[in-house]
């Protein structure tokens, strides 16, 4: 059984001023927090919008909880001179700044790149946008739904002839957040070598097209528009989910011709190995419809668990199509220690999904629950050197809040 232990985290000592909200930016800073960075989440008086998104449990948003652990929160009114001074003091003490405001908002708030670099010349400044600045879409809203639509993704998901389908979660917000993290880490290395900061902009739309890899490249190289294929793959056959006798689906496939022979042996369809229509993967892709009809009929002859056992015995990759509730009943989840608990100020012990990489043989534990709105303000201000009387005045004047 794997353990979750308190390891020396690789980003310990790195400080981040986090002005981001909702998902792409907060997910990026949560990854940095999981890796040991100190994140100060600077929120407006109303708080991060996602604090109010359903489902709500005892006044707390599950959505917010999913992307904001490991951070400190301070509420600052950046429209006041005193508020901006606090923000600048936080920035001076930080290595990284992340924001995902719409174009022009950072400048209005006084935390744009030009202003910030006058305060902290070697800052690593990361902006996450819907679209690249200085283009025709600079002012265009870049919500993940819009990006999924414009990237072509929604036109490739679902069954042939069906309506456009959205991925169930904000896929490109997450991917853009991860690309932002990789860019930030490369910038940290660059600064260690040169002493210079870096300006990073990560557009969701660009990240979407980049991360779809072979789907757009198939079109660019062949001129053929990819089509909806359900769970199937445009370049590998078979590689999809098949319905079994018990009504459940099993996902499986053969990545190469040697695996194809084992796949056929499992299904007791060895004669197909000699069929010229299906001899190579290129042949199988060309004759996809005929082959999938044969395989689909065969899978309907047995229950999913029996097929899973047979496929695994023959070293053919396979897995049952789970509902989300079934995911967390799989014994692997406990064995691999994918989940842990952290104490929240209002909800008590809450489950959290741990950072996926195993570092030095161990899983990184969680240091801090998702923060209450402004819950760390006094601690942050004290660390900046502010005395108690001035901190009280900031609260009384509404420059900061909430505790």
Image (cartoon, rainbow, N blue to C red):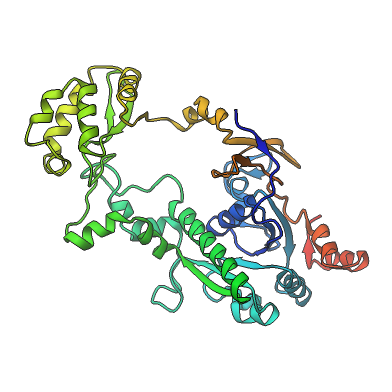
Q: Is residue 329 visible?
A: no
Q: Quadrant of residue 356?
A: top right
As drawn, the residue found furthest toward the right would be 389
Locate residue 265, reporting x and y percent: 21, 23
Locate residue 261, reporting x and y percent: 20, 29
**From the viewer's perspective, is 263 left or right of 358?**
left
| Relative to 323, residue 42 above or below | below
Q: Which of 398/364 is in front? A: 364
**From the viewer's perspective, is 64 left or right of 331?**
right
Residue drawn at point x = 29 percent, y = 43 percent: 158
**From the viewer's perspective, is 148 left or right of 371?**
left
Q: Quadrant of residue 362?
A: top right
Residue drawn at point x = 66 percent, y = 50 percent: 9
Q: Is residue 365 visible?
A: yes
| Relative to 96, residue 5 above or below | above
Locate residue 274, reporting x and y percent: 8, 30
Image quadrant occupied by the C terminus: bottom right
Image quadrant occupied by the N terminus: top right
Q: Which of 230/239 is in front? A: 239
């Amino acid at each position: 059984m794997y353990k979750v232990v308190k390891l020396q985290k690789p980003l310990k000592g790195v400080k981040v001023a986090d002005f981001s909200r909702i998902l792409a930016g907060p997910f990026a800073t949560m990854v940095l927090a999981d890796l040991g960075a100190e994140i100060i989440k600077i929120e407006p008086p109303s708080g991060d919008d996602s604090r109010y998104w359903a489902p709500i449990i005892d006044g707390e948003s599950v959505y917010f909880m999913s992307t904001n652990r490991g951070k400190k929160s301070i509420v600052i009114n950046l429209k006041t001179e005193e508020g901006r001074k606090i923000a600048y003091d936080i920035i001076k003490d930080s290595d990284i700044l992340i924001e995902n405001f719409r174009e022009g908002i950072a400048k209005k708030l006084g935390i744009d790149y030009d202003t910030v670099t006058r305060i902290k010349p070697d800052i690593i400044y990361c902006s996450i946008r819907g679209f690249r600045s200085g283009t025709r879409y600079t002012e265009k809203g870049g919500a993940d739904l819009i990006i999924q639509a414009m990237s072509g993704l929604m036109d490739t998901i679902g069954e042939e002839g069906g309506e456009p389908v959205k991925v169930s979660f904000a896929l490109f917000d997450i991917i853009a957040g991860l690309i932002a993290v990789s860019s930030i880490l490369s910038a940290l290395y660059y600064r260690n070598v040169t002493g210079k900061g870096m300006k990073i902009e990560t557009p969701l739309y660009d990240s979407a097209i980049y991360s779809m890899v072979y789907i757009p490249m198939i079109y660019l190289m062949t001129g053929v528009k990819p089509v909806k294929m359900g769970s199937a793959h445009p370049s590998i056959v078979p590689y999809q989910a098949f319905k079994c006798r018990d009504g459940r689906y099993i996902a499986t496939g053969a990545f190469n011709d040697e695996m194809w022979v084992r796949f056929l042996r499992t299904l007791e369809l060895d004669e197909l190995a000699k069929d010229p229509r299906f001899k190579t993967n290129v042949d199988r892709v060309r004759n996809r419809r005929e082959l999938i009809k044969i395989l689909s009929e065969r899978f309907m002859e047995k229950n999913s668990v029996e097929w899973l056992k047979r496929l695994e015995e023959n070293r053919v990759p396979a897995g049952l199509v789970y509902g989300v509730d079934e995911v967390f009943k799989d014994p692997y989840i406990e064995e691999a220690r994918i989940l842990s608990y952290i104490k929240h100020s209002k909800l008590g012990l809450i489950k959290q999904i741990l950072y996926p990489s195993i570092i030095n043989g161990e899983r990184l534990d969680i240091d801090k629950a998702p923060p209450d709105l402004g819950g760390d303000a006094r601690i942050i201000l004290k660390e900046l050197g502010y005395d108690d009387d001035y901190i009280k005045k900031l609260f009384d004047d509404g420059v900061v809040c909430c505790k």
